[in-house]
Image (tube, rainbow, N blue to C red):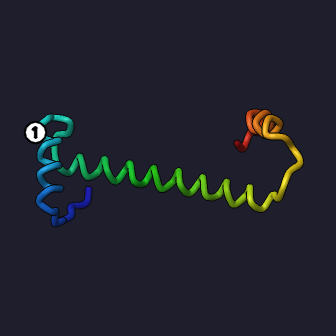
Amino acid sequence: MKRQSISLTEPNNDWLNQLVEAEEFSSKSEVVNDLIRRARHSAEEHHLIRMKLELAEKSGFTELTPNEILKESYTRSDA
């Protein structure tokens, strides 16, 4: 595992200490790694949504009713 040195603002340091003291995490490093994992997961979700929106924009307009679109979305494998 790589070691890094980071500087924290006082409020952020206090918050990390509170999480460790509450035994939600065993160390500040564990908290920071969890935050990074969550941020990466969120970025991946945003990328997927962005890709789906771009695909939808490129597909053009439809004559389907909202109910037909909803029904189709449940049957499509890429939805």
Percent position of residue 27, x then y: 16, 45
Instruction: Please give left or right for residue 74 compared with residue 33 in the image.
Output: right
Where residue 12 sits, quadrant-wise, is bottom left
Residue furthest out toward the right: 63
Q: Which element type, helix, strand or loop, lies under badge 1? A: helix
Where residue 9 sits, quadrant-wise, is bottom left
- Residue depicted at 75% across the width and 36% down the height: 70
Percent position of residue 26, x then y: 16, 40
Instruction: Please give left or right for residue 43 compared with residue 38 in the image.
Output: right
Vertical arrangement, residue 67 with respect to residue 44, above or below: above
Residue topped by disc 1: 21
Percent position of residue 47, x then y: 56, 57
Viewport quadrant of the N terminus = bottom left
Where residue 3 sits, quadrant-wise, is bottom left
Say what amino acid the circle numbered 1 marks: Glu
Is 2 or 31 nearer to us in this picture? 31
Instruction: Please give left or right for residue 7 compared with residue 40 in the image.
Output: left
Is 23 or 72 nearer to us in this picture? 72
- Residue depicted at 70% across the width and 42% down the height: 79
Instruction: Please give left or right for residue 76 compared with residue 37 in the image.
Output: right
Percent position of residue 52, x then y: 67, 54
- Residue depicted at 74% across the width and 60% down the height: 57
Q: How many marks?
A: 1
- Residue depicted at 86% across the width and 43% down the height: 64
Q: Are there few (<14), some (14-19), or many (20+) residues within 10 Å of tag 1?
A: few
